[in-house]
Image (spheres, coloured by chain):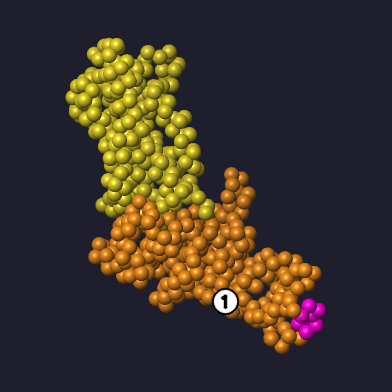
Amino acid sequence: MKAIRVVELTKSYGTKRDVIAVDNLSFEVEEGQIFCLLGPNGAGKTTTIRILNTLLKKDSGKIYFFDIDLDKKPQEIKNIIGVVQQHTNVDSELSVWENLLIHAMLHKMKKSMFEERATQLLETMDMLDKKNRFANKLSGGERRKLTIVRALLHNPKILFLDEPTVGLDTLTRRAIWNDIKQLRSSGKTIILTTHYIEEAQMLSDQVLIINKGKKLIEDAPNILINKLGKITVEYQENNKTAYKFFNTTREAKVFSANLNDLNSIFIRETNLEDVFLTITGNGGEQYCNSLEKCFP
Amino acid sequence: MQLVGEVFPIVLRDLIVLKRRLIVLIGSNLMGPILYLTAFGWGLGSQIHTPEGSYLNFVLPGILSLTAMTSAFNGSGPSITISRIYTKTFEELLIAPIKTSSIAIAKIITGLIRGILACASLILVSFFYGANPFLWNGMFIIHLSFCLLIFSSLGVIAGLIATSHETMNRLNSFFITPMAFLGGTFFNTNLLPYPISCIINFLPITPCSNGIRAAALQKPLVIQYFFEESLWLIFLIFLIIWILKNKELTTPY
């Protein structure tokens, strides 16, 4: 079943509506998937997410959550979504427990259910001993974990994670990756945006790359990598790093043998970052900047 | 019942914070009024006599309406701006399965509570200045409630439309401060030249301070004040509804 269906979504800013943030964007998310929105800065990822979680108004288009029209039943949809914002918007003037209590009350949870679930989630995130601590006394990672606990408290079917690991150290980031994987195992649908392409490759079932509000390509990460070529040759050309993609290591080695500066050659597996840079044209002139050129 | 369930958590949050800051908040709310009472009530007031008796008895209802105005406005407005623009905690309310009108009602109630707290403290303090315990009558409470509701609503509007904390300060400088001095707080507005008194009588603070003063000094009931206060309150509620429907309540990022 489709957890989310977005049809021709458009959003613009400015008094003359001349800054188009999201341009006729359509996509679908299967239930139980981790769906990743990728794009360079200003691509429209956060705007799209913020429209989906009802924080921003759209100009046009339709959005359905499990076939429920967002325009018609926003309250019903707000009950089945959880949101972790890009910024850690916990209430600094409240304790961890109070933050969760207010969230539970806003979501009309019963007290016994709240206490059981909050305890369980805090324990999972290794934060139960900090439940009486004020949110402004928590570390960056702990605050981020609190936003995740809060978003999960009312047991939403769909979880929006907007750059969930931004600004976190490697250890905390890896811990959060594990939590996200566990959430997928529990059947949650997760919409993820991230600047860390490694994160997207590791976690996502499906990736949508957008730029300037428009859809560029959408597929599973391994399919995108295979389309580009499983093997990458990195080499120096005119004092710049150039990249060439091949389907087999043999083809890559044959190509490398003909290069002049053998010391600068690096043969490796292609990753999602190569796909991203190729697709968005951010890799310099060596890169193709259209789907047709990349994936003929 | 559903409305209560939606409004209560937001008010509870504000009450928890209010409880933690109670002493500081009362102190800061009283600082201005105490200075006014000292300067205009004791200092200047000892030299002035009004048809109502001592100037202190005349000015106290004005200072009370001024306190109600600033504490209700500042009790609702700035916290909304900060939570919308800086801490982004307002987004937690917007994505909750509650109506945006419930958020507005909750914030108006918060402003109302803060205003009641400030006014009650001021009434207590005013006894030390030798004011008559004249205030507790029904008309007085109704006018004071109107005043608190009007300015708490105005604070909600300011909080929802302000694009930064500076905008909020500007609204304070251009609207609240002039009203504090001109809206019948320290003098009878009818003493001003005709066109100016017309403008000043149109301000929302003027019927409030005139009404509170009339009730406090046990003057005959003036329906016009109730009418003007009601009109202001209805207008502001419609404005809030319009803003909630038409305005983006959060920043793009």
- Of A210 and A144, nearer the camera is A144
Q: Which chain is orange?
A: A
Query: Is residue B229 rendered to the left or right of residue A236?
Result: left
Q: Residue at x 68, y 70 (%)?
A: A278
Q: Residue at x 42, y 72 (%)?
A: A179
Q: Is residue A1 above or below residue A247?
A: above
Q: Categorize mark 1 by other alpha carbons within 10 Å: few (<14), some (14-19), many (20+).
A: some
Q: Amino acid at mark 1?
A: Ala
Query: Is residue A117 rendered to the left or right of residue A214?
Result: left
- How many numbered dots are placed on residues in this image? 1
Task: Name, please, the residue furthest toward the front.
Answer: A263
Query: Is residue A286 rendered to the left or right of residue B214?
Result: right
- Of A55 and B3, nearer the camera is A55
Q: Is residue A100 above or below residue B120?
A: below
Magenta-colored stretch includes residue A256: yes
Magenta-colored stretch includes residue B163: no
SS at circle 1: loop
Find residue A135 and report its horizontal and vertical position in percent. 37, 56
- Residue topped by disc 1: A220
Q: Which range is magenta?
A: A255-262
Find residue A67 and report its horizontal and vertical position in percent. 45, 67
Find residue A124 and report its horizontal and vertical position in percent. 35, 71
Q: Residue at x 66, y 66 (%)?
A: A280
